[in-house]
Image: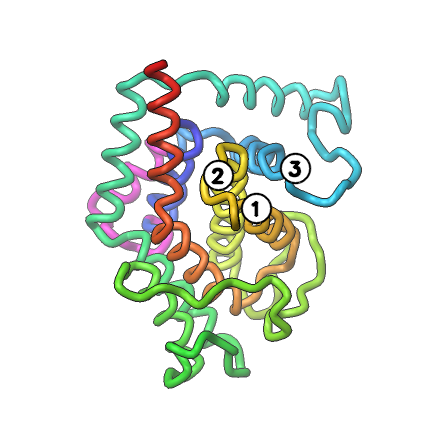
């Protein structure tokens, strides 16, 4: 589908930027970015999906906020196109590409590399889950991302009210990064927050993991509007691990297949 295509495009782009798999990264980055929806459409898709689970707020939908403008029309048309059913061939191609990214270790390597850089750039020690306490600051975030690739260790429960979480200033997606994060680090944090907000919103709408789905959708929808910080890497690693351990994406796929066969 359109959103998994964005996942593939994002990680080949990041691999290319970080000089990973140099023989093929440039070509595959260009190919998948040409196949993926534009960034503003990806973001608008996420915002529309998460909107029902957010506190009441003024409509920010591009098509209704500024009706009749070229930008609004362009985004609305792209959204309509993205919502159309992909062919079986398209779905198979994206699935193969996602599996290849995982087999090559690109997703984990991107996360570890950027998390390590972010940790080195900050002067204070991060507050992390008990499993990671023995590590020094530069190693804490990297260790958290490596945990996200292992199904043997469950993350600490994510609590949005935890006083240890950073008090970030609300900001629009795309605002200049905080002083501790580079543009590339900010891009990874933004993408992962958006992905989590989208996946939990879909889960909530489909009745998948109903005990937590709505809360997680609201949490990540809110955090999408916060300025990125180095701590985000540890939180994202735990949240992605939770998504994997609960099998959210697999449950969504199974429900979609069941609906198609009715």
Q: Which one is nearer the viewer's eye here, 209 or 245? A: 209
Which of label 3 and label 2 is nearer to you? Answer: 2
In the displayed structure image, the side of residue 119 where residue 258 appears, left or right: left
- Dot 3 alpha-carbon crowd within 10 angstroms: few under 14, some 14 to 19, many 20 or more: some
Look at 25% across and 48% down and name the residue there.
102
Region rendered in magenta: 16-32
- Residue 198 falls left or right of residue 258: right
Q: Is residue 210 magenta?
A: no
Q: Which residue is mark 1?
A: 217
Q: Are there few (<14), some (14-19), or many (20+) residues within 10 Å of tag 2?
A: many
Image quarter for residue 73? top right
Percent coordinates x, y for residue 82 in the rendering: 49, 22
Q: Secondary structure at mark 1?
A: helix
Q: In terms of sequence position, does the residue under pointer 3 or pointer 2 come before the other?
A: 3
Q: Number of labelled discs?
A: 3
Q: Along the polypeptide, which appears first: circle 2 or circle 1?
A: 2
Q: Position of residue 42 (x, y in %)?
A: 53, 34
Dot 2 lies on which element?
helix
Mark 2 to mark 1 CA distance (whole Å)? 9 Å
Mark 3 or mark 1, earlier in chain: 3
Q: Which residue is mark 2?
A: 203
194 to 6, vertically: above or below: below
Q: Which residue is mark 3?
A: 51
């Amino acid at each position: 589908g359109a959103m998994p295509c964005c996942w593939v495009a994002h990680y080949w782009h990041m691999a290319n930027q970080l000089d990973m798999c140099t023989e093929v990264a440039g070509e595959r980055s260009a190919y998948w970015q040409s196949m993926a929806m534009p960034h503003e459409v990806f973001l608008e898709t996420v915002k529309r999906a998460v909107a029902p689970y957010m506190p009441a707020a003024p409509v920010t939908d591009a098509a209704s906020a500024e009706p009749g403008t070229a930008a609004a029309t362009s985004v609305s048309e792209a959204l309509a196109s993205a919502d159309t059913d992909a062919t079986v061939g398209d779905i198979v191609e994206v699935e193969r590409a996602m599996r290849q990214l995982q087999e090559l270790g690109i997703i984990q390597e991107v996360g570890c590399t950027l998390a390590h850089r972010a940790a080195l750039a900050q002067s204070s020690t991060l507050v992390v889950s008990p499993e990671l306490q023995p590590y020094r600051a530069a190693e804490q975030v990297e260790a958290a991302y490596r945990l996200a690739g292992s199904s043997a260790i469950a993350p600490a429960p994510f609590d949005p009210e935890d006083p240890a979480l950073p008090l970030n200033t609300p900001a629009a997606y795309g605002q200049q990064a905080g002083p501790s994060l580079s543009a590339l680090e900010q891009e990874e944090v933004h993408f992962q927050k958006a992905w989590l907000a989208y996946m939990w919103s879909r889960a909530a709408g489909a009745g998948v993991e109903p005990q937590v789905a709505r809360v997680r959708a609201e949490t990540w929808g809110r955090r999408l509007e916060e300025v990125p910080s180095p701590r985000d890497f540890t939180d994202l690693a735990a949240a992605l691990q939770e998504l994997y351990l609960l099998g959210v994406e697999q449950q969504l796929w199974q429900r979609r297949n069941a609906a198609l066969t009715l």
